[in-house]
Image: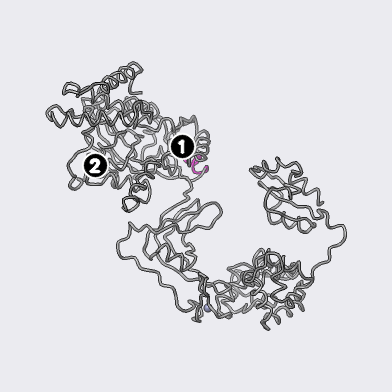
């Protein structure tokens, strides 16, 4: 550390003396500067202050007063001198001493091991040790010290040239204005690091801005980059910047001899040296790993806790620890070969909204789908994203050409969080909703109280196509060998014109198509034949009646013996069924009033689809009304399969742990539901295997 215990005691005593003095004199100025440098270091670098903010402010104000009265005695390394009162008029472009290259990226374990293998091949080393550091989501910087004094701070720019932002860099308290490099034989040194903003500081800044009615800053990274380039250093200081140093770019002694290859031969030791000189380095959060397996484990451990880290990070940086290895590996034109970035799966990303397409669904609903420049989000490339409906587009004021922030949380489909209004240049265009169906040109309607526009034409090509796709889909008739693309192709070729046609395919014509052979046609034939055996509730769901999902279809079928019986239920009778509200009832009622629908069903009945519920043979009710809940990871069956098994055997599923639950089936990694269930004595907790034995 920068200060020894002895020095810490002395500086603490000095502080107390200064605070106790009635009036400070010109002669106290050097002591004040010395004490305040110490407290800045404790506060900004170590995050461990030894005085209160009030005491610090008291000393700071006293020093400023003395400096105003005795300008000739101002010390260049006084904390007050961090903030230049002069506005910066334009930033000069400066060349980096050594280009600031970017890092190659890796995204998974395999990439990491490949990197290690490549590096070993290249260097002919049998084993390579690495340092792993957080990859801060901030703004890169190169800072030069000459004769112990900070002389220049420059942004990364294009890597070859950046902008000279020295006055703003000097306002960052975790960057020492002076550091004792000469003691280590260093005349001039360039450090690389990242300018960042702590999350809570960033939040406070935004809260303040909101109170003042100022525009909110989008994120900590942009805010840091922006703050480095503000023209008023006082404003830069107000942005609460922090800096981590993580690399030595170059270093020479008084005779101009390069020290990188003689003195700085071990990255981990280099960082420890910088820490001892008063710099903030990610030592505590980095790992010195003996091999790539340790790197992998370190990253996994870090990724799990990164949400709670006080700075934004978007990955880890892996560097070969020894200079010798780094030298052997060298550089490509773009990257060092001895380092790689490991990118965390982004949960949020920004991209450009390029275009919008209006898609018509099977119920005529018109959904705006944004086309965006392809971007990585949580490990998936996103090129289009649902914009839901007109109301949401209006609320979020999304415009073509906007840079948008998109997010994907868990299994939820990605969505647009907001447009980055601050990045608009005036060329963005408002989204115009179509006044007619974009596919068939029919009129569109939006009933009072609904958000969705619909094409009113039931024969609309898009609707017919989507209905067929729904019919063959997995939860519906699950026709093996027929999916979205095949339906589209057949529909385009007029091999399919309606759902009924699925059971009357012209297989000879299919056989003539590119990509089809005897085998695939046979598979399709079997898939279609086999689908005739699906239970009536699956058929009911497959019909695509609005508001009738699989669960509702099951409810409806529980009320009748034969699917045709539904045609005889009144609105009132329908609404008496559990979970059937007026909307669902109306939709079902209307469906069975359309003669064409009844004709289609009669046709399906003739060709052998299932309308009659199977009478349950006695003894099949092994679970006999017992209630079940599944939690954790199941290994032998999917969730849906498990639910089906419960229902087929006369059991019931419930959705939460309560006294009404008879059995909790706990798979691997079962969490809170398991602990809740353990607290209720009447619940039997069983394994997946025990469940399967119950119904065997
Ligand atoms: Zn239409």
Task: Tell me where residue 259 appears, x and y as whole percent.
Answer: 29, 27
Residue found 23% across the figure and 24% down from its top: 32
Residue 531 visible in image: yes
Residue at the outermost left position: 72
Label 2 beta carbon less than 8 Å to ligand 1:
no
Residue 289, label in figure = none
Find numbered disc 1 in the image and state the secondary structure of the residue it sits on.
Answer: helix
In the image: residue 467, left or right of residue 66: right
At a point 77% along the width and 75% down the height, the residue shown is 608
Is 110 one of the magenta-colored residues? yes
Residue 506 in view of the camera: no
For disc 2, the marked residue is 234
Residue lying farthest bottom? 595
For residue 690, what is the image quadrant?
top right
Q: Which image quadrant for residue 317?
A: top left
Q: Secondary structure at mark 2?
A: helix
Residue at x 46%, y 37% (from the top left corner)? 121
Between tags 1 and 2, which lies in front?
2
Q: Please report the bounds of the magenta region as a residue range.
A: 109-116
Query: Picture coordinates of residue 149 (x, y %)?
Result: 22, 29
Q: Mainly helix, strand or loop, the magenta region?
A: helix
Q: What distance separates the C-alpha of mark 1 from that of mark 2?
A: 51 Å
Q: Position of residue 329 (x, y in %)?
A: 39, 36
What crowding class fits label 2: few (fewer than 14 Cα within 10 Å), some (14-19), or many (20 or more)? some
Disc 1 target residue = 121
- In this view of the protein, which residue sits in the foreground, 674 or 210? 210
Q: Residue furthest right?
A: 618
């Amino acid at each position: 550390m920068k200060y020894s215990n002895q020095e810490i005691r002395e500086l603490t005593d000095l502080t107390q003396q200064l605070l106790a003095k009635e009036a400070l004199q010109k002669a106290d100025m050097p002591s004040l500067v010395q004490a305040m440098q110490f407290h800045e270091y404790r506060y900004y670098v170590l995050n461990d202050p030894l005085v209160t903010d009030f005491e610090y402010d008291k000393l700071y104000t006293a020093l400023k007063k003395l400096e105003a009265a005795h300008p000739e005695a101002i010390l260049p390394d006084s904390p007050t001198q961090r903030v230049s009162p002069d506005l910066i008029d334009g930033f000069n472009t400066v060349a980096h001493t050594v280009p600031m290259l970017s890092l190659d990226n890796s995204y998974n374990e395999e990439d990491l091991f490949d990197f290690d293998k490549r590096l070993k091949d290249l260097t002919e080393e049998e084993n390579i040790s690495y340092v792993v550091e957080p990859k801060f989501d901030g703004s890169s910087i190169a800072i030069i010290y000459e004769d112990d004094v900070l002389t220049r701070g420059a942004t990364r720019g294009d890597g070859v040239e950046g902008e000279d932002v020295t006055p703003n860099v000097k306002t960052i308290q975790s960057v020492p204005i002076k550091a004792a490099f000469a003691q280590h034989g260093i005349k001039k040194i360039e450090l690389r690091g990242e300018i960042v903003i702590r999350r809570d500081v960033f939040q406070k800044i935004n809260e303040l801005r909101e109170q003042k009615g100022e525009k909110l800053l989008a994120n900590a990274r942009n805010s840091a980059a922006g703050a480095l380039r503000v023209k008023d250093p006082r404003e830069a200081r107000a942005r609460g910047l922090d800096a981590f140093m993580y690399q030595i770019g170059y270093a020479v002694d008084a005779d101009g001899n390069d020290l990188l290859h003689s003195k700085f031969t071990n990255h981990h030791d280099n960082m420890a040296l910088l820490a001892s000189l008063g710099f903030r380095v990610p030592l505590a959060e980095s790992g010195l790993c003996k091999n790539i397996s340790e790197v992998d484990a370190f990253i996994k451990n870090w990724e799990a806790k990164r949400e709670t880290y006080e700075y934004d990070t978007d990955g880890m940086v892996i560097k070969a620890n020894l200079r010798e290895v780094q030298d052997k590996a060298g550089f490509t034109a773009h990257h060092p070969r001895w380092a790689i970035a490991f990118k965390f799966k982004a949960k949020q990303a920004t991209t450009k909204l390029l275009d919008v397409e209006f898609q018509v669904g099977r119920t005529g609903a018109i959904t705006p789908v944004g086309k965006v420049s392809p971007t990585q989000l949580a490990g998936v490339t996103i090129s289009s994203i649902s914009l839901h409906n007109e109301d949401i587009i209006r609320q979020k004021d999304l415009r073509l050409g906007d840079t948008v922030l998109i997010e994907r949380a868990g299994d939820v489909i990605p969505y647009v969080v907001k447009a980055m209004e601050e990045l608009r240049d005036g060329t963005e265009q408002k989204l115009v909703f179509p006044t007619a169906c974009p596919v068939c040109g029919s009129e569109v309607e939006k009933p009072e109280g609904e958000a969705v526009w619909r094409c009113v034409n039931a024969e609309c090509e898009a609707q017919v196509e989507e209905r067929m796709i729904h019919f063959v889909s997995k939860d519906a008739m699950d026709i093996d060998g027929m999916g979205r693309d095949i339906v589209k192709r057949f529909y385009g070729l007029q091999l399919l014109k309606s759902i009924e046609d699925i059971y009357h395919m012209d297989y000879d014509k299919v056989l003539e198509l590119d990509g089809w052979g005897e085998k695939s046609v046979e598979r399709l034939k079997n898939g279609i034949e086999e689908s005739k055996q699906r239970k009536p509730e699956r058929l009911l769901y497959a019909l695509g009646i609005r508001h009738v999902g699989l669960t509702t279809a099951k409810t409806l079928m529980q009320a009748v013996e034969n699917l045709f019986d539904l045609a005889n239920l009144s609105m009132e009778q329908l609404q008496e069924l559990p979970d059937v509200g007026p909307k669902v009832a109306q939709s079902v009622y209307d469906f069975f009033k359309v003669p064409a629908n009844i004709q289609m069903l009669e046709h399906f009945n003739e060709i052998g689809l299932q309308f009659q519920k199977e009478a349950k043979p006695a003894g099949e009710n092994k679970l006999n009304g017992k209630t079940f809940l599944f939690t954790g990871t199941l290994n032998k069956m999917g969730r849906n399969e498990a639910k089906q098994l419960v229902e087929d055997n006369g059991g019931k599923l419930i959705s939460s742990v309560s006294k009404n639950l008879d059995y909790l089936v706990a798979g691997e990694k079962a969490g809170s539901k398991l602990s809740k269930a353990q607290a209720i004595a009447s619940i039997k907790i069983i394994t997946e295997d025990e469940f399967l034995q119950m119904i065997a």
